[in-house]
Amino acid sequence: MVKLSSALEKIDIPRKTVYRLSLYQRCLQKLLDQNVETVSSEDLAKSAGVKPTQLRKDLGHVGQFGTRGLGYSVATLSEAISGVMGLTVLQPVVMVGVGNLGSALLRYSGFRKEGFEIIAAFDADPSQVKVAPDQLGLPVYDVREMGRYVADHGVRMAIIAVPESAGQAVADVLVASGVQAILNFSPAVLNVPDEVIVNHVDLAAELGSLSFFVS
Amino acid sequence: MVKLSSALEKIDIPRKTVYRLSLYQRCLQKLLDQNVETVSSEDLAKSAGVKPTQLRKDLGHVGQFGTRGLGYSVATLSEAISGVMGLTVLQPVVMVGVGNLGSALLRYSGFRKEGFEIIAAFDADPSQVKVAPDQLGLPVYDVREMGRYVADHGVRMAIIAVPESAGQAVADVLVASGVQAILNFSPAVLNVPDEVIVNHVDLAAELGSLSFFVS
DNA sequence: TAGATTGTTAATCGATTAACAATC
DNA sequence: TAGATTGTTAATCGATTAACAATC
């Protein structure tokens, strides 16, 4: 019997566990493609780069999906994680900032594979965007239209790839228009209400901190 | 009196502290540009997006730089952090993979500002690279030349932006050639010796994990 | 049944925060 | 001296790991 935490009851799962769940999900997808039917916590953990005991603890936050002595059904576990993560429906996302990084991310196929569709992009100066619209495969609007667009389309997730100076203002508009989760590639520290989640990917700091460990 | 841990004695600082030190360093740089001479832990912490008490704890791992009642000298603290982080010399870095993401990162100015210089790029098929060499400002070599180049030039840091299938093989060559720290943008989980440090930026997982928090 | 592997509790480890004495 | 702010210890919190009973 599979026990699933009800979608209605507010489940709180540690942020790090949530992050790893999406790693597990990707590994399971690969196993599905290879027609593997069953996997043990040991094997799945290894392919995700974690300890088996951590994997089992993580899954414990979500429910019970395994069979003792056998392991996990790849299909069942994958569906369960997708369900909890809200990955069962294609999630619309907007991209803000279409410079170097923004346009590279627009062409990155990994997001779509994960179940996301970037439906529109915004820039402070769309006429300056160097990549042809048909190359990007979506329209680039003036950032002044962003608030309305996001509200009208019920968009709840956004990716920010603007210069530091513009980060906070962009975030303010997104939040005011209903965005609940932001992936922030700008160096700006974003101040948002508690109920809004920000994942900050600080490229310069990631590289900078590596320097400590060399030589 | 400023006390600095000797460069010879092996200091071990938690990885998260090291990461935040590079945030502080960037904030201090901005203060320097504004000719601010002194800053309190409260103000510096706020601009880095952490609690003052955490900032002071982090600095405590490195030495004593403040003046009670007054705060920190921006110049002194900045130099101290640069010293500990090894940011006083321009650090040469190689980029592996010049696709969408790789070429965007090559044009990203944030790395250079932080004290890094990307001195060469490698790709499995340099003839396929879409961006003109003079636009990138550096040569793109065949990946088969990577090992020799890295060893010859004493390169100790690398950025990996290749497809998942190539990630591990690339890492193996880098490590064998003397690379000690890797910033990995490929989805691959890299197996490297303990003395090599990997920062993994998993774009799809960052976005994927946000999905849990919406609606 | 015997072997394998989960689910979960307890123990450990590390990181964050609060509090405050030291001291400019 | 009085006010401010650091440096550091102790308390709290959360996350990881080990261990093992439950059970297929």
Image (cartoon, coloured by chain):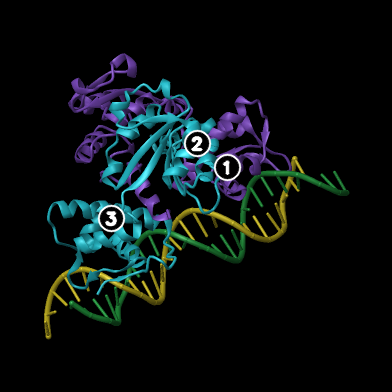
Chain colours: A cyan, B purple, C yellow, D green
Mark 3 lies on residue: A24
Both marks 2 and 1 on one chain? yes
Q: What element carries label 2?
A: helix
Marking on residue B63:
1
Front residue of B66/A165: it is A165
Q: Distance between the residues labelled 2 and 3?
A: 37 Å
- Judge from the rendering whether residue A150 lies leftward or rightward of residue B142; answer left or right: right
Front residue of D24/A111: it is A111
Mark 2: give few (<14), some (14-19) or many (20+) Cα within 10 Å.
many
Earlier-in-chain disc, 2 versus 1: 1
Q: Position of residue A163 (x, y in %)?
A: 49, 30
Q: Is mark 1 on a helix, strand or loop?
A: strand
User: Image point 34% across, 39% down: which residue?
Assistant: A118
Q: Position of residue C21 (x, y in %)?
A: 72, 57
Q: Mark 3 lies on which chain?
A: A
Q: Mark 2 lies on which chain?
A: B
Mark 2 lies on residue: B84
Q: Position of residue B209 (x, y in %)?
A: 37, 51
- Judge from the rendering whether residue A59 lies leftward or rightward of residue A141; answer left or right: left
Check whether the beta carbons of the residues at disc 2 and disc 3 lie within 8 A of each other: no
Q: Which amino acid does label 1 sit on?
A: Gly
Front residue of B212/C19: it is B212
Q: Which of the 4 image quarters holds residue A6?
A: bottom left
